[in-house]
Structure formats: structure tokens, C-alpha cells
């Protein structure tokens, strides 16, 4: 994740600062920042990264993790096993008026 984001402290190149990607989950409450439950531990494995330019159009994000099951629980014990144990991440953007 750090490699993909390209923070200056990781690249050592200040000229790349305008290209740094920003994770939108930073705007969510700490208690909501998880997309998988692995052996009882809430983990954020999925991310939405945006450029600084796109961040200007950012309205908000949600992680729909309220009904997640633990991915290590045997599927045989779960009725109607889900298609995925990863919660959907959704971000909303709107261009400025007149753009």
C-alpha cells in the first residue's frame, strides 16, 4: 500500500508529491475502517485511493461491513454463505459546479 501511494518519505523525491495517492478511508471513523474479519480480527484489506485532484471532488465514503462474517469460519456452518467475505467500499464524488 505504501509503495502504491508514493508518499515523499517513501520515495525520497519531493517532485513526486503532486502524484501521491490519498486513501479515502481516512475520513471514516476508526471503528468503521475494516473490510474483512479474519479470525475475529477486523482488518482493512481493501482501499480506494484517489489523486489530490480527485480528492477535491470527494464527498464521502462508506464501508458496508455491518453484516460481515468471519472469513475463517467454515462455510459448512454458515447458512447461505456469502459470495465474498470482503465488505463493499463506496466513494462518492461530484465535480464542482460549472466543470
Image (cartoon, rainbow, N blue to C red):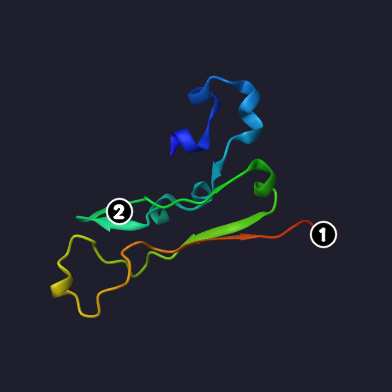
**Residue nearer the viewer, 28 or 49:** 49
- For image coordinates 70% across by 48% down, the residue present is 56
Q: Which mark is residue 42?
A: 2
**Where does residue 94 sit, x and y in percent of width and height?**
70, 60
**Where does residue 73 sit, x and y in percent of width and height?**
17, 64
Helix, strand or loop at disc 2? strand
Helix, strand or loop at disc 1? loop
- For image coordinates 14% across by 74% down, the residue present is 76
**Residue nearer the viewer, 56 or 12:** 12
Label 1: few (<14), some or many (≥20) within 10 Å? few
Left or right of residue 33, residue 53 in this image = right
Q: Which mark is residue 60?
A: none
Q: Earlier in the sequence, mark 1 or mark 2?
A: 2
**Where does residue 48 sit, x and y in percent of width and height?**
51, 51
Q: Which mark is residue 97?
A: 1
- For image coordinates 42% across by 49% down, the residue present is 30
Label 2: few (<14), some or many (≥20) within 10 Å? some
Direction bottom: furthest residue: 80
- For image coordinates 32% across by 71% down, the residue present is 83
Q: Is residue 15 above or below residue 91?
A: above
Amino acid at each position: 500500500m505504501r509503495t502504491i501511494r508514493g508518499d515523499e518519505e517513501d520515495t525520497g523525491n519531493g517532485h513526486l508529491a503532486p502524484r501521491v495517492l490519498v486513501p479515502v478511508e481516512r475520513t471514516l471513523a476508526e471503528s468503521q475502517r475494516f473490510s474483512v474479519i479474519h479470525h475475529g480480527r477486523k482488518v482493512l484489506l481493501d482501499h480506494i485511493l484517489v489523486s489530490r485532484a480527485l480528492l477535491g471532488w470527494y464527498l464521502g465514503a462508506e464501508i458496508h461491513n455491518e453484516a460481515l462474517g468471519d472469513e475463517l469460519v467454515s462455510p459448512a456452518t454458515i447458512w447461505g454463505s456469502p459470495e465474498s467475505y470482503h465488505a463493499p467500499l463506496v466513494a462518492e464524488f461530484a465535480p464542482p459546479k460549472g466543470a
